[in-house]
Image (cartoon, rainbow, N blue to C red):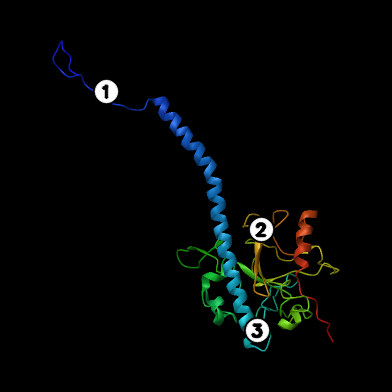
Amino acid sequence: MIDTSTGRRPASRVAGFTLIELLVVIAIIAILAALLLPSLSRAKQSGLSASCLNNLRQLQLAYFSYAQDHNDQLVPNSYVYAITDTDHPYEDEASWCPGNVRVDTTTSNLAAGLLFPYLRTPAVYRCPGDRSTLLTTNDPPRVIPRTRSYNLNLWLNCSVLPEGSLTLADAARRSLVQVFGFIDTHENCITDPTFGIYEATDPLFSDKWIDTPADRHGQGANLSFLDGHVEHWRWRTSKQCDGWGLDVRNDLDLADLRRLQQNLPMPRVLE
């Protein structure tokens, strides 16, 4: 349209947002982000847990392969820092994976483990959700991830516990489906490669966490079982660890311990 009084076309208006409209849009975006972020976080955590379960499945398969190659004998699990000893008398014994993960700055101990010929991928020994680190001895020191997140059930061919299972046949007396093998261990207490736990009938340690399981996967840990399957267990209460041989903190913590104790192999009768 032309202005007849001037003979000129009027300038067109430029469409745009007012300040209030921009603030409304920003507020809507913020609300949507707040709604979506928890879902994204849960999806990420679920992915990390799935990767962890896959690691445990591979470790359990390697564990089974070792037994097949060694006339049903379970891989040794005897590199142990016993909490009642100060000189660590079991430190030189054979193990599926020797070493102290709190000071291992290389994968050399993984490679020295009896299970490593069956699973030569160091990354599999570490849970992807484990954020624990250590300092190297280099100058200057570097912060690096720990090399291992998993421990193996004390009751599986560990010289500290003579009544434990030495073969798959021993462990199968309770059923391989029920006996847990590898477990996601709490980053504040993991040291040696053995997960210490005693029976619910033990006179000294029945109500104690010798080692503490992880709870980084939605207040839960991942476990493998001797038949090859893996499971995610959600704990009734969060797991706290500032040492070894800890008393259970409450009834819920005791229920979690009892659940794990129910998945130990039956003790061997010693002659």
- Residue at the spot 81% in from the left edge and 62% down from the top edge: 207
Report crowding for label 1: few under 14, some 14 to 19, many 20 or more residues within 10 A (C-alpha).
few
Which label belongs to residue 67? 3
Which residue does the image show at 62% across and 83% down from the upper left? Answer: 66
Quadrant in the picture for the N terminus: top left
Q: Secondary structure at mark 2?
A: strand
Q: Is residue 175 above or below residue 233?
A: below
Residue 98 in view (yes/no): no
Q: Residues under labels 3 and 1: Cα distance? A: 81 Å
Residue name at image x 57 percent, y 57 percent: 46
**Horizontal relation, residue 37 to residue 175: left or right:** left
- Crowd band around label 2 with a 10 angstrom C-alpha radius: few (<14), some (14–19), many (20+): many
Q: Which mark is residue 13?
A: 1
Residue most extreme to the front: 1
Q: Mark 3 or 1, which is nearer the eye?
A: 1
| Residues packed near mark 3 inside 10 Å, few (<14), some (14 to 19) or many (20 plus) | some
The answer to whether residue 123 is visible is yes
Q: Furthest residue to the top?
A: 5
Q: On the image, which quarter does residue 10 sit in?
A: top left
Q: Earlier in the sequence, mark 1 or mark 2?
A: 1
Which one is in front, 237 or 191?
237
Find the distance from the CA under tag 3 to the CA under tag 2: 29 Å
| Dots 3, 1 in contact, CB < 8 A | no
Residue 195 location, quadrant: bottom right
Q: Position of residue 119 (x, y in %)?
A: 55, 78
Vertical arrangement, residue 232 with respect to residue 228, above or below: above
Q: Amino acid at mark 3?
A: Ala
- What kind of residue is marked 1? Arg
Give residue 253's position: percent from left, percent from top. 76, 56
Q: Which residue is mark 2?
A: 220
